[in-house]
Image: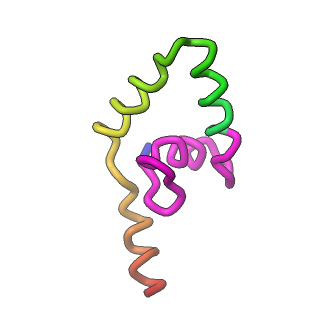
Amino acid sequence: MYRSKKDKILFGVLAGLSKMIGMENPGLIRVLFVILLFFTSGVPILIYFLMAMFIPYDHAEDIEIKEKK
């Protein structure tokens, strides 16, 4: 799993997760994450920031972004 630089809003964790499971649009994962926050009293926020610290960015996206310039 990698974080996304291209589709990120905060750190790219949820966009990377949606890409890993084969979803084109990370919007559904983001909505599910927000709903999960209400039912778990904020525990996913801790998990999100831990994932943001330890999961690297996708280097294939770096190459793709450089090629477009």
- At horizontal 60% and vertical 30% (from top left) the residue drawn is 33
Q: Is residue 67 above or below residue 11?
A: below
Q: Is residue 9 above or below residue 53?
A: below
In the depicted view, which residue is nearer to us: 17 or 30? 30
Labels in figure, total: 0
The percent coordinates of residue 52 (x first, y second) are: 36, 39
Give the residues drawn in magenta, as a range.
3-28
Query: Is 39 positioned to the left or the right of 60 in the image?
Result: right
Q: Main secondary structure of the magenta part?
A: loop
The percent coordinates of residue 51 (x first, y second) are: 37, 34
Q: Is residue 13 magenta?
A: yes
Query: Is 53 positioned to the left or the right of 16 in the image?
Result: left
Q: Residue furthest bottom?
A: 69
Q: Is residue 59 above or below residue 8?
A: below
Query: Is 8 positioned to the left or the right of 26 in the image?
Result: left
Query: Is 28 positioned to the left or the right of 53 in the image?
Result: right
- At horizontal 39% and vertical 23% (from top left) the residue drawn is 46
- At horizontal 43% and vertical 31% (from top left) the residue drawn is 48
The percent coordinates of residue 25 (x first, y second) are: 68, 52
Q: Is residue 15 magenta?
A: yes
Q: Residue furthest top?
A: 40
Tell me the quadrant of the picture where the C terminus can be found. Answer: bottom left
- At horizontal 48% and vertical 84% (from top left) the residue drawn is 68
Residue 47 sits in quarter: top left
| Colouring used for the render | rainbow
Tell me the quadrant of the picture where the N terminus can be found. Answer: top left
